[in-house]
């Protein structure tokens, strides 16, 4: 937010709550283009994280549910359905919850960044990098 908006100096700026600032298409694109490449199925010995992806699907579901006061269900912990369960949960968030989730995801990635510091220069890690 700009300085003039934060402190009320801009007469054109209306300090009103924004309603529906995360439409369904934005949530879908976020999941497909940003979140999905960072995910792996965690908590299952049959599935390995060979690509060294930083976010476990089941752990992320647990965290998002805890933050939003939701309860997890069986689909969230099933390795075959957890991916779709997360996609549904992200798509079903209210706009403000969606942006909270984006911040949570960023915090989780940043907290685990030290695990990936030795491969930052490798080609394997390029698929997770975004130009800022």
Image (tube, helix red, strand yellow):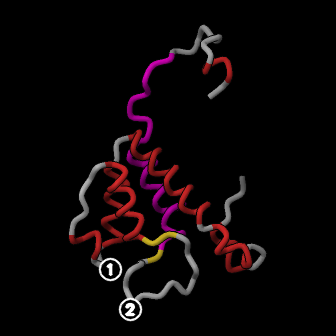
The magenta stretch is 15-39
**Is residue 26 magenta-colored?**
yes
Left or right relative to 16: residue 77 = left
Q: Main secondary structure of the magenta part?
A: helix
Q: Residues within 10 Å of mark 2 (few under 14, many from 20)?
A: few
State the SS at label 1: loop
In the image, is residue 54 above or below residue 15? below
Q: Residues within 10 Å of mark 1 (few under 14, many from 20)?
A: some
In the image, is residue 81 above or below residue 73? below
Q: Mark 2 to mark 1: distance in Å?
A: 9 Å
Q: Which is nearer the eye, 26 or 129?
A: 129
The x and y percentages for residue 29 are 48, 55
Measuring 32% from the left and 80% from the top, which residue is drawn there?
79
Left or right relative to 124: residue 63 = left
Kindly identify which residue carries mark 1: 79
Measuring 43% from the left and 41% from the top, which residue is drawn there?
22
Kindly identify which residue carries mark 2: 46
The answer to which quarter of the image holds residue 44 is bottom left
* Quadrant location, the N terminus: top right
State the SS at label 2: loop
**Is residue 33 magenta-colored?**
yes
- Which residue is most to the top? 11
Q: Mark 2 or mark 1, which has the lower sequence index?
A: 2
Q: Are marks 2 and 1 in contact (CB under 8 Å)?
A: yes
The x and y percentages for residue 99 are 47, 44
Measuring 32% from the left and 68% from the top, which residue is drawn there?
84
The answer to which quarter of the image holds residue 66 is bottom left
């Amino acid at each position: 937010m700009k300085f003039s908006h934060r402190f009320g100096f801009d007469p054109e700026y209306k300090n009103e709550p924004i309603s529906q600032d995360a439409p369904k298409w934005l949530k879908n694109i976020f999941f497909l283009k940003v979140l999905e490449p960072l995910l792996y199925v965690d908590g299952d010995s049959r599935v390995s994280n060979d690509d060294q992806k930083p976010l476990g699907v089941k752990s992320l579901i647990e965290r998002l549910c805890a933050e939003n006061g939701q309860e997890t269900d069986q689909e969230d912990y099933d390795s075959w359905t957890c991916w779709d369960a997360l996609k549904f949960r992200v798509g079903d968030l209210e706009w403000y919850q969606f942006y909270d989730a984006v911040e949570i995801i960023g915090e989780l990635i940043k907290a685990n960044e030290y695990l990936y510091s030795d491969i930052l220069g490798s080609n394997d890690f390029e698929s997770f990098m975004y130009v800022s």
